Image: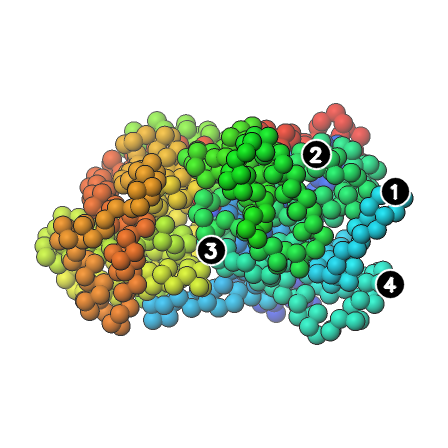
């Protein structure tokens, strides 16, 4: 801890002088931000080292969480809060005439993720460190994060996200811990000492260099590590074997450099359609192999043998993207450690656990055998062996049922099926919300659940309440702590003690005042950036998330058009003034999603400029949705739109962030919405639309008849016609594809089918909002019941139910000697 403000200021100024050779007056804001970051990093350095020592000496099981995405956002504010010195720094910097908020806003978001899956990994890191759990992250240090979205003339444009251009104060490069990952080449078999050896030759070596980022627990002694790997060319200094060096020389140098750089260059911006691109597979194997090599190396240094590996190490894979951990572990055990197949397999299966995040068939990863074979020849051999043994095993469960075995195979029809690999090669498979896990067990992975019922389990997602309430909504956090104390920060379930305050009118007023201030802050941002004036007293109706057909931004848009029509027909229509707020990125190649963005922007242009309805409706699309923008938007929301086609959204986590900030959910019975309803009760959530069972039933029947609805519902017909009859201020055929997806392609996502139930739910929302006392009660109920959705709860469930690990804390008898050092 800094002993005084004076000492802190001295440290900060020393950093500024040392790093930039500048005085306070000369230093730019960016210099100041960097100096502050470096001071904070130094401040926790000792704790970081001590945490690792503790883990080492204690010798209990450690977990490695492998994820191809970590959507961290900014770190300065979160780190200061977790260390417990944010206030202190703010005051001390204030005395130097520096605004801490300004410095915090200079930090580039670490946007190393697309959406839910990546942000979940980031929330988990925070909870794992805060619960003193020995879990480390393993991922890729992308040079470019998720693209920056610009809206030009209503269309999405993608710009590179050069987030490292000013450097990254939070990372430490560890070149001495680099390892070599091998691609391409051939495998030679050789009998030596009575054993068959596999020798990988003529491969292209890539140097994987780790960058470690500290993950600071909330006001405890834990600093865990997120290790991100960066790809570099191998050179003589790296102490390469002679043969490797020779090989590099033989390679076309420029091409080699280019190929290597590409590996950790960009994050794939598509989280909906898997793409069988070689580069993506390279990325996956790159961080998997690097991570495992460093884990095994470290383990062996401590333990000598690998006999107890599965007792001491757990590897968790976040979706199937890191599923190559399974054959790669087998390769290391067999080829490098000389183990037999059976023993290696047993250790591997007992080490790996897997989370599934989606049931969308187009997102299920499968790799063409050809690509796998060419890029990773030895891994492919192992996959073939895994497949053969797995199919033989299935034969016992389903004797004679070739169809079933074919359906379940790891390799079939010239593809490697990654989910099948992940299930066969792990001891635990979990879904991310109750309904999602049920659908996995009963539909998508039914045969697997029959074969391995003991592997399947549910772990409903969660979010870190520290970032999403304490940090994003400091005034609400302070109010809560004043009323019920601050133990909710450590035990989020204690938020429940707020429940009875929903009946306290004075408290409701305070909560409402904070909400209003948050809305004013967002309105200021919108005004400064877009020149659009929002009424902070209007209902802020918010739909922010990736743009995807199943998330149904289109349903929201069509309803706005319908509302506009009705308002024009009857300007006295009794609805509270509403501000529709959208944000979200579409995958660059996702044509339909991009048209939906254009549609929303077209509606905004039309509605916002119509003097007749101006004060009743506003529509804004905020560009470049990111963690930082979410932190601004979510605390300002009244209504949280979670309107996916039932069965399609595995869980959703935005829904949880909104309720924690006192927004009311308007949603379908999908993902975690179902559990939110269970927590808050029917009267504190607005539910509408088809259920998952109904949707699945329709699919079995080949859908419903969208045209019938069109012909029988004039209101709907009008809206649909307006998409294509020149009514909207956009080029002629602009929205024909949307029209066609609804009518000619028969509305795969039930937008029209759910339209009237949705409109009715929206009316209910408006009515409830108009009753401010009622709405205030609902808001408080939502906050009070959000504790369950803290990632502290989720991560504890993983720790107990899957990983079987305990917190590692100071004060444990084992540690006494060490703590005194
Ligand atoms: C293109 C390959 C691909 C496929 C799927 C890339 C990324 C994915 C992810 C699994 C998509 C994703 O982010 N899924 C979301 O995961 C969240 C965390 O569990 C859930 O809350 C969301 O419902 C789910 O869509």
Callout 2 environment at 10 Å: few (<14), some (14 to 19), or many (20+)? some
Mark 3, mark 1: which one is toward the viewer? 1
Where disc 2 sits, the SS reads helix
Q: Mark 1 points at which residue?
A: 194
> Label 4: which residue?
242
The residue labelled by disc 3 is: 273
Indicate if the residue with disc 3 has its beta carbon within 8 Å of ligand 1.
Answer: yes
Tell me what residue is drawn at x 75 percent, y 59 percent. 186
Which sits earlier in the primary sequence, circle 3 or circle 1? Answer: 1
Estimate the spatial distance between the alpha carbons at disc 3 and disc 1, rounded to whole Å. Answer: 47 Å
Q: How far apart are marks 3 and 4 (CA)?
A: 42 Å
Residue 801 bears which disc, if any?
Answer: none
Which is more N-terminal, label 2 or label 3? 3
Q: Which of disc 2 and disc 4 is earlier in sequence?
A: 4
**Quadrant of the rendered image containing residue 188:** bottom right
In space, the residues marked 1 and 4 are separated at their CA atoms by 28 Å
């Amino acid at each position: 801890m800094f002993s005084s403000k004076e000492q802190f200021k001295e440290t900060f100024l020393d950093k500024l002088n040392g790093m930039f050779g500048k005085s306070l007056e000369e230093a730019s804001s960016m210099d100041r931000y960097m100096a502050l970051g470096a001071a904070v990093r130094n401040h926790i350095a000792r704790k970081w080292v001590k945490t690792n020592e503790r883990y080492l000496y204690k010798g209990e099981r450690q977990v490695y969480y492998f994820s191809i995405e970590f959507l961290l956002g900014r770190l300065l504010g979160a780190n200061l809060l977790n260390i417990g010195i944010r206030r202190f720094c703010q005051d001390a910097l204030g005395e130097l005439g520096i605004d801490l908020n300004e410095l915090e806003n200079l930090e580039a978001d670490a946007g190393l993720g697309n959406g839910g899956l990546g942000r979940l990994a980031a929330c988990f890191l925070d909870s794992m460190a805060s619960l003193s759990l020995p879990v480390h992250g393993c991922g890729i240090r992308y040079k470019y994060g998720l693209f920056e979205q610009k809206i030009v003339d209503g269309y999405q444009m993608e710009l590179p996200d050069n987030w490292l251009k000013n450097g990254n104060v939070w990372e430490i490069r560890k070149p001495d811990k680099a390892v070599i990952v091998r691609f391409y080449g051939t495998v030679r078999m050789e009998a030596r000492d009575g054993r068959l050896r596999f020798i990988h030759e003529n491969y292209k070596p890539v140097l994987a260099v780790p960058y470690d980022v500290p993950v600071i627990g909330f006001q405890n002694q834990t600093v865990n590590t997120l290790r991100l790997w960066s790809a570099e060319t191998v050179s003589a200094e790296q102490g390469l074997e002679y043969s490797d060096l020779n090989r590099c020389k033989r390679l076309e140098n420029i091409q080699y450099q280019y190929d290597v750089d590409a590996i950790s260059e960009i994050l794939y911006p598509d989280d909906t359609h898997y793409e069988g691109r070689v580069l993506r597979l390279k990325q996956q194997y790159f961080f998997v192999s690097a991570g495992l090599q460093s884990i095994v190396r470290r383990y062996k240094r401590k333990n000598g043998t690998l006999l107890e590996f599965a007792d001491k190490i757990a590897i968790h894979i976040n979706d199937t993207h890191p599923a190559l951990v399974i054959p790669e572990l087998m390769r290391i055990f067999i080829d490098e450690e000389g183990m037999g197949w059976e023993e290696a397999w047993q250790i591997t299966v007992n080490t790996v656990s897997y989370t599934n995040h989606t049931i969308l068939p187009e997102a299920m990863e499968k790799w063409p055998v050809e690509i796998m074979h060419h890029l990773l020849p030895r891994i492919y051999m192992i996959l073939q062996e895994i497949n053969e043994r797995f199919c033989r095993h299935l034969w016992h469960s389903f004797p004679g049922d070739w169809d079933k075995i074919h359906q379940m195979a790891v390799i079939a029809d010239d593809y490697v099926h990654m989910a099948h690999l992940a299930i066969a090669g792990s001891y635990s498979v979990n879904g991310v919300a109750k309904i999602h896990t049920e659908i996995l067990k009963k539909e998508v992975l039914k045969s697997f659940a029959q074969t391995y019922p003991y592997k399947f389990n549910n772990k409903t997602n969660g979010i870190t309440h520290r970032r999403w309430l304490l940090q994003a909504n400091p005034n609400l956090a302070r109010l809560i702590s004043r009323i019920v104390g601050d133990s909710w920060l450590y035990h989020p379930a204690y938020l429940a003690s707020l429940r009875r305050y929903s009946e306290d009118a004075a408290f409701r007023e305070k909560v409402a005042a904070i909400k209003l201030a948050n809305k004013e802050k967002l309105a200021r941002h919108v005004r400064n950036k877009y020149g659009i004036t929002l009424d902070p007293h209007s209902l802020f109706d918010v739909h922010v998330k990736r743009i995807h057909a199943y998330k149904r931004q289109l349903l929201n848009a069509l309803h706005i058009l319908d509302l506009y029509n009705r308002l024009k027909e009857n300007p006295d229509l009794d609805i509270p003034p509403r501000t529709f707020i959208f944000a979200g990125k579409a995958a660059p190649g996702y044509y339909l999603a991009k048209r939906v963005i254009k549609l929303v922007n077209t509606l905004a242009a039309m509605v916002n400029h119509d003097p007749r309805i101006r004060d009743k409706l506003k529509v804004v699309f905020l560009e470049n949705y990111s963690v930082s923008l979410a932190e601004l938007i979510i605390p300002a929301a009244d209504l949280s739109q979670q309107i996916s086609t039932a069965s399609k959204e595995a869980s959703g986590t935005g829904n949880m962030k909104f309720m924690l900030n006192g927004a009311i959910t308007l949603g379908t019975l999908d993902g975690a919405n179902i559990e939110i309803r269970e927590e808050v009760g029917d009267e504190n959530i607005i539910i509408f639309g088809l259920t998952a069972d109904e949707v699945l039933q329709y699919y079995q029947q080949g859908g419903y008849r969208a045209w019938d609805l069109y012909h029988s519902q004039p209101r709907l017909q009008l809206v649909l016609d307006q998409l294509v009859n020149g009514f909207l201020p956009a080029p002629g055929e602009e929205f024909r594809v949307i029209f066609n997806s609804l009518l000619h392609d028969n509305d795969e996502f039930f937008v029209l089918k759910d339209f009237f139930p949705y409109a009715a739910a929206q009316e209910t929302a408006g009515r409830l909002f108009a009753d401010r006392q009622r709405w205030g009660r609902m808001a408080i109920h939502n906050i009070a019941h959000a504790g369950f959705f803290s990632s502290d709860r989720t991560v504890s469930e993983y720790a107990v139910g899957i990983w079987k690990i305990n917190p590692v804390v100071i004060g444990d008898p084992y540690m006494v000697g060490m703590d005194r050092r």
